Image (tube, rainbow, N blue to C red):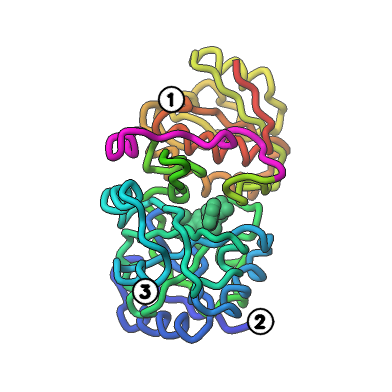
Amino acid sequence: MSMNTKIIDCKTHIDEEGLKKCGELLRHGEIGIFPTETVYGIGANALNETAASDIFRAKGRANDNPLIIHIANFDMLKDLVEEPSEMEQKLIDAFFPGPFTLILRKKKNVPSIVTAGLDTVGIRMPENEIARKLIEYANCPICAPSANISSRPSGTKLEDIEEEFDGKVAFMIDGGMTTIGVESTVCKVINGIPTILRPGKITPQDIEAVVGTCKLDSHIFKCATGKVESPGMKYKHYAPNTKALMVYSENEEQMIELVKEHLTENTAIIGFAEHKKYFPNHQFYVYGHINHLDEVMHNIFTLLRQVDHVQADFIIIEGVKKEGLGIAIMNRLIRSVSYNYIEK
Ligand code: TXA
Ligand code: MG
């Protein structure tokens, strides 16, 4: 089914009337695209089963992969989940609003299509003003996965995803490029230990600072099959259409050598600004500066899409250290190259 997709421009200032309309559309069962501080989301009224199922259809998403629910205030939380434990409450106090999703025990009124039949639900309170206002205008919780066709890189600016969803959603809100650039940290308290199921801007150290402990799920850098805590980890993800390889060495010179070893005539490289000069005869896409992993995080998804539009037959991506923000970056990059990864 094709519909007329309304575009709402909130790039330089918020179009309140436009947002209000979008809120009403969501409330009445339409789906639409909106920015958050992490990536763009494709949202629906979380309490409306038909609307939620439209999202799975629009994305081509497997129906065993649950959606997270976005809220604008703490009143919305009470109707969705059972009373959080003391540790869960500390995490909520510390990281809501923000790039953080907490998995909690769901109440009955959350439709099982949203949680893919699980008895838990992921909850996030975005900080982005457009997202918050949209949810407030909708006056209902909004389930929203990242706005990308399944397996494609997540959208960090509307231009990157417009084509994928034109005619499939009631509206798209343009809020410019998202500030963070990768999806929220997904965390679940398992046997009293906060466990990161998907790494993001909120790092294990950030969580440790609040509750004293934190661990990473064992699938963060590995290919997951069968039963896993977070179903999303099983699926192919973030892939550009061109074949790609990632290389990493803690030793910078060695990393540059690794890139050189695997170059073909028509390779595009994604890497550090400081390394561009070593590859004058190749298309080199800068994702940021060494020691500025926030830049890398911000740019990585849009670059993975950009390289598809150039005439390259191979992509080499420089890896980063798996520490701090580097954990989330490497989790995405390893998947984007389909585990085609060399570390020396
Ligand atoms: O930053 C974000 O989180 C973005 C923006 C739009 O908010 N949303 C997003 O949603 O990334 P999505 O659906 O693309 O990713 C949600 C992840 C998936 O990996 C899913 O498997 C996992 O969270 N997840 C959702 N509910 C879960 C649950 N009850 N238990 C375990 N994992 C869950
Ligand atoms: Mg996603």
In the rendered image, residue 259, in percent from the top left (x then y), is placed at 61, 22
Among numbered discs 1 and 3, the one appearing first in the sequence: 3
Residue at mark 3 to residue at mark 2: CA–CA distance: 24 Å
In this orientation, which residue lies closer to the viewer: 236 or 114? Answer: 114
Residue 282 is at least partly visible in this image: yes
Q: What percent of the width, then of the height, locates residue 228?
A: 63, 45
Residue at the (45%, 32%) spot, across then down: 326
**Could you say which is closer to the camera, residue 269 or residue 199?**
199
Residue located beneath label 1 in the image: 274
Sequence-earlier tag: 3 or 2: 2
- How many numbered discs, if any? 3
Q: Distance between the residues labelled 1 and 3?
A: 40 Å
The alpha-carbon separation of the residues under discs 2 and 1 comes to 46 Å
Residue span colored magenta: 205-226
**Residues under numbered marks 1 and 3 in contact, where contact means CB atoms less than 8 Å apart:** no
The residue beneath circle 2 is: 2
Q: Mark 3 points at which residue?
A: 134
Give the residue type that dot 1 points to: Glu
Quadrant position of ligand 2: bottom right
Residue 220 on the magenta segment: yes
Instruction: Give above or below for 16 relative to 86.
Output: below
- Seen at 57% across and 73% down, the residue is 52
In this view, the residue in front, 85 or 9, is 85
Indicate which disc, 2 or 1, sits on the residue closer to the N terminus. 2
Quadrant showing the N terminus: bottom right
Relative to 123, 233 lies left or right: right
**Label 3: how many residues lie within 10 Å, few (<14), some (14-19) or many (20+)?**
many
State yes or no: Cβ of the residue under disc 1 lies below 8 Å from any atom of ligand 1: no
- Give the residue displayed 30% in from the left and 57% down from the top: 97
